Amino acid sequence: MATAEHVSEPVEGLTIPRLLRRNARRFGDRPALTTGPGPEAGTLLWSQLRAEVAALARGFGVLGLQRGDRMLIAMSERAEHWITDLAAVHAGALPCSADDTLSTGQLRAVARHSAATVLVLEGEEQLRRWRPALDDLPDLRAVVLLDWNAAPPGDPRFVGYTAVRGALPPDDAGFEALTDAVTPDQPLALVYAPGTTGDPEGVLLSHRDVIHESLLQDRRLPVPDHPRSLACPPAGHVAQRALGTYLPIRHAGHVTLCPEPDRLLPALLAVRPHAFLGTPRIWEEIAAALRAKLTELPEEELPEERTAAPPRARTTAPGAHRPPSEGEDAPADLAGTPERLDARAAGLLREAVGLDDCHRALSGGAPLPAGVPEFLVSAGLPVHEVRGLGRPTGAATTGTSGDRSAETGGVPPGPDPHRRATEKQPTAALGPTYP
């Protein structure tokens, strides 16, 4: 069984491709990616994941993807998204994930700004959204389509994912050379997310950035060796990239991908993650589920303050997690932090939603609505709100759930390599970013 010292190692000189190689060699028979929480789910081991990345990287070379090129990716939370992204990194290209909520106009802006040479789409839905933006990609060489049945007839720009993956036979020596060629300060990914105004903002990540981010999280919120985690949309957010993708690679963890948001709660129960990153809306759903379970607990499991007036607690519970509407004051019973539930009762609640073994609970994308963090703390589930999502690694500061003072300060991010964030028209992403 692997121990902490087998996974932890000096980070100087490390890159994501080197970590992937380490995982394939030392933890090759451990699970890496599982798509979906059900019995039909498929799992890739770390050795299998790296083999898939190598095959696709060779195919991208046939398409003419070169060092310094950009690649746009529009996929749901699935294994092929990981494989595509990592294959581009090995090829020396810069993968760019765009948020799936971007409008047609924003997609056009991303297309123009990225100057991508390859676009990788999942299927009919992604093709419908991106097709109006194809003319905004003057350097486009190929559109790789995972679902070939959705390909438009007679358009030579389109090629199937399977065909790209099988374009060349294995070349182990060549792939190891690609792995060794990647350097820590080399750009790792460019993430486009909606800005507060105007066109989407691009955030540039380097290998050094995300590896230092993992050190910060380990210091603040340690997790067991090879932690289980659950990844759910949106994959295009900086926090999901840094904390939901690259951090598990460093830990050689087991990530279960949940592409369907409505299956989140069953997925949590199936995975029982050690680490979980969700948006505020997801944490609202979890709070609602916890409150529903609270009404089902026997009276002897509730704290004395609540057993004295259970009808009131049960009357207010379903709506207490709801954020106030515009112009509406927060409910009076949310003005202060609610009493902490008895440890046994809180444990039963967390177990009922699959978060009884969660060591690292994170929220990103926006502040949690009033009442949600306080209730989660009362249930023994402090959620750390990630601040500064427009920064390179997605965690410029973090604040503990329920501690609103963190909004004005927060916890320093620890080791701070030269952090780089692009502006609304980020010059760092225009043209080649490295030789």
Image (spheres, rainbow, N blue to C red):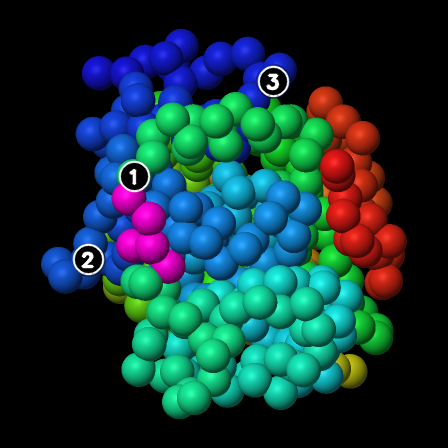
236 magenta-colored: no
Label 3 element class:
loop
The answer to whether residue 101 is above or below residue 353 is below
Give left or right: position of 80 versus 395.
left
- Give the residue displayed 80% in from the left and 41% down from the top: 420
Task: Find residue 412 and report its horizontal and vertical position in percent.
Answer: 76, 30
The answer to whether residue 336 is above or below residue 413 is below
Residue that mark 3 sits on: 13
**Quadrant of the drawing holding the N terminus:** top left
Q: Main secondary structure of the magenta part?
A: loop
Residue that mark 2 sits on: 41
For the record, the magenta segment spans 164-169
Residue that mark 1 sits on: 170
**Quadrant of the drawing holding the C terminus:** top right
| In-front residue for pair 2/335 | 2
Amino acid type at mark 3 = Gly
Mark 1 to mark 2: distance in Å? 27 Å
Q: Residues within 10 Å of mark 2 (few under 14, many from 20)?
A: few
Q: Earlier in the sequence, mark 3 or mark 1?
A: 3
Amino acid type at mark 2 = Ala
- Mark nearer the viewer, 3 or 1: 1
Amino acid type at mark 1 = Pro
Residue 116's image quarter? bottom right
Label 2 element class:
loop
| In-front residue for pair 282/86 | 86
